[in-house]
Amino acid sequence: MANTLKNIFNPGVDQIAQTYTIESWHVSQSIDAFTGAQAYDIVLSGSFTLSGSSSITGSLNVTGSVSSSLGFYGTSSWAANSSQSTSASYALTASYALSSAGGANAGGADKQIQFNSGSTLSGSSNFRYNYNLRSFEMGDNVVASGTGSFAQGINTSASGLYSHAEGFTTLANGYSSHAEGSYTTSSGGYSHAEGSNTVSPGANSHAEGYSTISSGSYSHAGGISAYTSHISEWARSSTPLGQYGILSLSNQTSGTTPAELLISSSLGNDYFTIPSNTAYFVDITVMGTLLDAGLNGASRVFKGNAIIKNYGGTTVFDGGSLVLSPTTGSATYLSASAAADNSHDRLAIYVTGSGTYNVAWFAKVEYTKLNNINSI
């Protein structure tokens, strides 16, 4: 156990006070304590000013604050660990820095992240943390201007809140969106664009591959030159000439009033439109199921296929009509049909229930599409 400095050695006999004899050990205890000849616990109350350098072996416990006009230096053996405690009023600022190299001054400019460069604290314009926006930039000519965003690579920009841009010349300006690869843009909220020259403007959409666009909300475009314009559409291609994909439609009927199936979501309703100068081969499966108690979920399935095209602004079936024929199921009183709606340039699927029954309807439409059918 360490000694303590005393002013009373034997009360009334040996102590440092007026009328008592000064003994050698009264002085030598201080010399032994400050030269390290013996271990002493020393407590200071008030302020302590030190000029020059001081070497500390062991632990340093501080309650209150420590300040330095020229900096506070330490070696690799001086570290903040369990043997060195500090209180809440003991703060580290830019003028008070600890490093294994013993440096004290921050390197680089404001917002540049500190790193060890040849045993010296350094900063770089290519490695920055914007504490106002809580955003992070790492790379050449990158900008993370959205709150909580991250831009990395070369010529990338993350301007959307909580967005992430990485790679080469990518742009993430949709809320919580992600753009990666080269020349990609994620402009839809929560969207993801990856690969090369891809764009994801649809909310919650995903574009991948090369030169693909996911414009419809919740849609997915992959491969080469695929384009999704409808809600929840899935499409893939390997050429700008055309693509294949899947769409789903649904609705609910009550009674015998016909209803058109819709591409529905929380963002609204959509229809299977046929753009000008395109042709689709569609393969349709429609299923209706009764919801009423006591009917045991009686169902009916209908199937059919045909070519539908929009040539010069006129939408028709090519080669006749599209018949949806029943294939299985016990609900024989349900019916379904399809039409080429020229007034709205879309494929329309109609369903009809029976009596007062409540029927849930769902359709899957698989298609093969050709673009620019009158380009020659």
Image: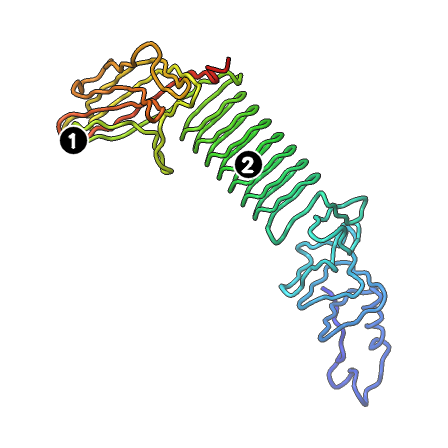
Distance, label 1 to label 2, CA atoms, is: 46 Å
Q: Which residue is rendered at x = 34% and y = 15% of the image?
A: 317
Q: Which picture quadrant has residue 1?
A: bottom right
Q: Position of residue 213 (x, y in %)?
A: 51, 28
- Closer to us: 85 or 329: 329
Q: Position of residue 330 (x, y in %)?
A: 18, 18
What is the basis of the colouring in this image? rainbow
Q: Position of residue 35 (x, y in %)?
A: 85, 66
Give the vertical position of 211 relative to 128 (above or below). above
Q: Which residue is rendered at x = 72% and y = 62% of the image?
A: 60
Does 294 sit left or right of 62 as displayed? left
Crowdedness near tag 1: few (<14), some (14–19) or many (≥20) residues, C-alpha within 10 Å? few
- Disc 2 residue type? His
Which callout, 1 or 2, points at the residue further toward the start of the chain? Answer: 2
Q: Secondary structure at mark 1?
A: loop
Does 361 sit left or right of 87 as displayed? left
Q: Secondary structure at mark 2?
A: strand
Q: Position of residue 322 (x, y in %)?
A: 29, 14
Q: Which residue is rendered at x = 57% and y = 38% of the image?
A: 172
**Disc 1 vs disc 2: which is toward the camera?**
2
Give the vertical position of 63 relative to 324 (above or below). below
- Closer to us: 180 or 85: 180
Circles 1, 2 touching at the beta carbon (< 8 Å): no
Q: Which residue is mark 2?
A: 178
- Disc 1 residue type? Ala
Q: Which residue is mark 1?
A: 293
